Image: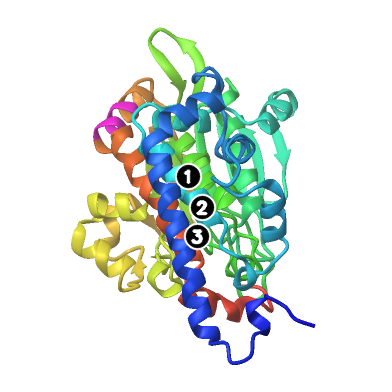
């Protein structure tokens, strides 16, 4: 029996074959990049009916797969990818990153896509009547409770110390939407819940960052986690919900506060960069171990230099420096530091200060000045591709392999 399959050919140089396959992939991806960059507006207009429909990023890549076969992976190809651990995937999300980079870079399609991500989610709209009536929504990763005009978002994944995964992102975006949609809510508070984890039993923990066990198992998707997180609930906290609104504002915004107990690792520290007030217990610490993990820490590279200065930003992001909440360099990230036993009283005082008539208008102007939407869009365009490449890097696969068994 004869075969043309090269793997069965005697004396075949498998290393050379792998190199040739990689070269072919690179050539095809270069063509995809050029095509999207040349036709981004045309593609986007076709998929959105001339920008008359808002499609979220997951809806957009699915629509593109149907309208332009081969440009992005099909749903069948992505379903196969989702069934595999990260080390065994074919890296098809890189093609999604190429596509979304081109769309986000586009001067008309990019802003429209950002606006699409600021729309309330269907899940939140479905839960809104019940939340308005009862003031409580319990989800797997977040408990939302309205008390005296404050939306308390409590991170409650005590099985993994509030490490982030797709479920947490979905629950957080739902909770943020509900807080912004409910007219009875004036301010929002994000705090970690009390843990049952043996190492922190009975203590509150803010966030342990990305769930590396889920990354190793292939359950940290580019579109539904890494990009949805940045363009979804984080931007909604920062800029508000895009609504029909009125002539004086196209968004519904409210002030937000974070209270940090124990630690804010990775994505936890990234969150602090967008809040109006950050309170931390004196024994808490902050870190962005992105270089150690091999990935990009969301939009922290975009924000931290502005907030903490370029030297501190490089020490934290590139060198893995850990900041204690009460040390001088942490004060650019943390507004107020108190003893752990004083946290509850300090939270009440800070919330009262945020509950002013002019706070919303002034935070809007501060955010516009500090982070113009166009600059954020350009950063996220490049992030879409670079993060896709990083999660398939051999170093990342190797490092997260140790988390394949057992919780973080």
Q: Is residue 216 visible?
A: yes
Asked if residue 73 is among those painted magenta in the image, a careful observer would answer no
366 part of magenta stretch:
yes
Instruction: Name above or below for residue 157 compared with residue 10.
Output: above
Sequence-wise, the earlier of marks 1 and 3 is 1
Please state the horizontal and vertical placement of residue 356, each as a whole percent of the image.
Answer: 39, 25
The segment highlighted magenta reads 364-369
Mark 1 and mark 2 in contact (Cβ < 8 Å)? yes
Q: Residue at x 60, y 73 (%)?
A: 87
Q: Which residue is mark 3?
A: 261
- Disc number at residue 99? 1
Q: Which residue is mark 2?
A: 95
| Label 1 element class | helix
Instruction: Tell whether label 2 touches label 3 (CB within 8 Å).
Output: no
Residue lying furthest front: 2
Mark seen at residue 256: none
Q: CA distance from mark 3 to mark 2?
A: 39 Å
Q: Residue furthest right?
A: 1
Judged left or right of residue 334, residue 93 is: right
Q: CA distance from mark 1 to mark 3?
A: 39 Å
- Percent across and percent down for residue 225 are 57, 51
């Amino acid at each position: 029996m004869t075969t043309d399959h090269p793997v069965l050919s005697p004396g075949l140089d498998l290393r050379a074959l792998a190199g040739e396959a990689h070269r072919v992939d690179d050539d095809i991806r270069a063509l995809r990049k050029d095509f999207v960059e040349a036709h981004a507006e045309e593609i986007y207009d076709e998929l959105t009916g001339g920008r008359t429909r808002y499609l979220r990023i997951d809806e957009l890549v699915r629509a593109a797969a149907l309208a332009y076969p081969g440009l992005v992976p099909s749903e069948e190809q992505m379903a196969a990818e989702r069934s595999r651990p990260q080390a065994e995937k074919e890296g098809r999300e890189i093609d999604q990153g190429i596509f979304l980079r081109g769309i986000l870079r586009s001067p008309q399609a990019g802003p429209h896509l950002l606006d699409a991500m600021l729309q309330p989610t269907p899940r939140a709209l479905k839960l809104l009547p019940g939340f308005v009536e009862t003031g409580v929504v319990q989800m797997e990763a977040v408990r939302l409770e309205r008390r005296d005009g404050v939306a308390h978002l409590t991170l409650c994944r005590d099985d993994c110390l509030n490490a982030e995964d797709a479920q947490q992102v979905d629950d957080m975006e739902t909770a943020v939407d509900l807080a912004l949609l409910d007219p009875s809510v004036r301010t929002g508070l994000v705090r970690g819940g009390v843990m049952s984890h043996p190492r922190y039993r009975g203590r509150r923990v803010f966030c342990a960052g990305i769930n590396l066990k889920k990354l190793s198992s292939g359950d940290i998707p580019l579109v539904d986690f890494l990009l949805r997180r940045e363009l979804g609930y984080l931007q909604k906290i920062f800029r508000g919900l895009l609504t029909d609104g009125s002539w004086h504002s196209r968004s519904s915004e409210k002030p937000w506060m974070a209270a940090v107990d124990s630690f804010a690792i990775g994505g936890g520290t990234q969150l602090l960069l967008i809040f109006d007030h950050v309170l931390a217990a004196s024994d808490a610490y902050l870190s962005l171990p992105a270089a150690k993990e091999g990935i990009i820490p969301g939009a922290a590279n975009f924000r931290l230099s502005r907030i903490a200065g370029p030297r501190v930003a490089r020490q934290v992001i590139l060198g893995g420096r850990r900041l204690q909440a009460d040390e001088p360099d942490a004060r650019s990230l943390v507004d107020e530091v108190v003893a752990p036993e004083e946290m509850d009283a300090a939270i009440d005082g800070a919330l009262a200060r945020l509950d002013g008539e002019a706070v919303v208008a002034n935070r809007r102007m501060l955010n516009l000045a500090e982070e113009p939407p166009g600059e954020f869009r350009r950063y996220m365009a490049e992030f879409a591709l670079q993060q896709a490449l990083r999660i398939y890097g051999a170093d990342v696969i190797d490092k997260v392999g140790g988390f394949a068994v057992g919780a973080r």
